[in-house]
Image: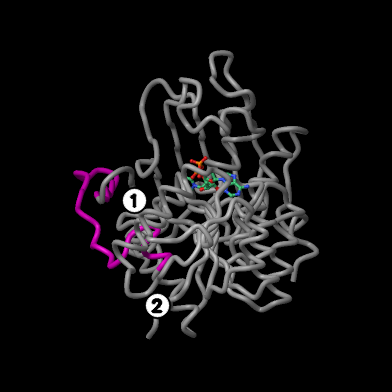
Amino acid sequence: MAAKRCLMIGGGGMAGGWISNFTQHFADRIEVVAVADVSDDVLARQGAALGLGDDALYTDFAEACASVEADFCGIAVPPQFHAPAAIAAMRAGMPVLSEKPIADTLEAAKEMLSVANETGLPCGIIQNYRYAPNKQELVAIRDEGRLGRLQHIVGRYACDYRKPASWGAWRHTMEFGLLFEGSVHHFDMLRFLSGGDCETLVGFGWDPEWSSFEHFSSGIYAMRMDNGVHAVYEGNSSAAGIMNCWNSEHYRAEFEEGCVEIAGGDTVTIHRAGQESESYEAPSIPWHAHLHLFDEYLNWLDGGPPSVTRIQDNIKSYALVIAAMETTTDGQPKRIADYLIDIS
Ligand SMILES: NC(=O)c1ccc[n+]([C@@H]2O[C@H](COP(=O)([O-])OP(=O)(O)OC[C@H]3O[C@@H](n4cnc5c(N)ncnc54)[C@H](O)[C@@H]3O)[C@@H](O)[C@H]2O)c1
């Protein structure tokens, strides 16, 4: 089968990672035929790396969507551009695969969802952390009932971003950067690990005086899922002690007959009251993180099953970000159904 032609919106940062994954692991399945990025330096670098002429390099993604013939559009630029870029691509007839979060506002996310529904085009959202051996193993323990029923999960994210710009300058100035850039992954993970969709969310956000962020860098949120499982989340981008940064977030799942602990690496630890703890390496998985999502998405384009984290599902994770933002502001519990009321 011919390689799928990709218009890539974004060429630096995470988008640069996508492009190098495409060329290293998917050279026979993906051909990047054009790149759009506001930075001339990034365009020059990617143009040289991919052997693209100036006519395939765009500073304006709308112009690129209107001119480029491609089989899909990849989007990895800051959040406020996701929905406009995705909508321009889908209106031009291209399926979309976009980085999280879906958008910068609930309205923009719903507009993107409605264009995906209206056009019927595949629109996948990246949630790479689900595709790690220890996360998949925890879900297998739950599904197979190896430790009985699940009652609650505690998730912890903690990164030391106390230096200005240490998490990319724009994340330090944006509003609710923890929620939109960080917690969107962890809320999605708590849905994935609990096996339920969130019914109610409540919590607090704050910015310690010594933070390098202009807005809240920390928060604690509690969730009740629709399958009766509860979850608690601690997010801290001003961490100074125990780190549970990217790929090393700590999750503890409390089951009927023991609890499961996972963090960095592939180790899974099971604690049973009155017994020695048991640690083992989670079984390997064929594709990790973004690679899993790229493979899954290409299969979807070829008629396979839709991406698990397609926009129609992932809006349920995104709604938790909006609910967390609002509970932080007004101190009231939020019913997630209220955020999703007008979507089909
Ligand atoms: N899934 C993950 O683990 C993960 C990790 C990091 C970032 N991300 C996501 O990737 C996206 C980009 O983040 P990043 O860290 O790569 O940011 P970045 O600032 O490092 O890079 C963004 C790139 O987009 C370009 N750009 C900015 N505005 C643009 C526009 N209007 N049109 C075209 N190009 C534009 C920039 O020039 C730059 O090359 C965000 O949505 C972020 O949440 C995801």
Q: Residue placed at 42% from the left, 52% from the top?
A: 46
Q: How is the image coloured?
A: one colour
Mark 2 vs mark 1: in front: 2
Q: Residue furthest front?
A: 54
Residue 214 vertical position relative to residue 116 in the rendered view, above or below: above
Q: Position of residue 15 (x, y in %)?
A: 46, 52
Residue beneath label 2, please?
Answer: 3
- Label 1 secondary element: strand
Is 286 on the left-hand or right-hand side of 203?
left
Residue 242 vertical position relative to residue 33 in the rendered view, above or below: above
The stretch in magenta equals: 267-294
- Label 2 secondary element: loop
Is 85 on the left-hand or right-hand side of 114?
left
Which numbered disc flags the more N-terminal residue, 2 or 1? 2
Observer-nearest of 32 and 210: 32
Q: Position of residue 155 (x, y in %)?
A: 46, 42
Observer-nearest of 172 and 150: 172
Q: Position of residue 25 (x, y in %)?
A: 30, 65
Q: CA distance from mark 2 to mark 1?
A: 48 Å
For the N terminus, the image quarter is bottom left
Q: Residue placed at 66% from the left, 41% from the top?
A: 324
Residue type of the residue flagged with mark 2? Ala
Image-quadrant location for residue 291: bottom left
Q: Residue placed at 31% from the left, 54% from the top?
A: 134
Q: Position of residue 93 (x, y in %)?
A: 65, 75
Q: Residue placed at 47% from the left, 67% from the top?
A: 33
Residue beneath label 1, please?
Answer: 258
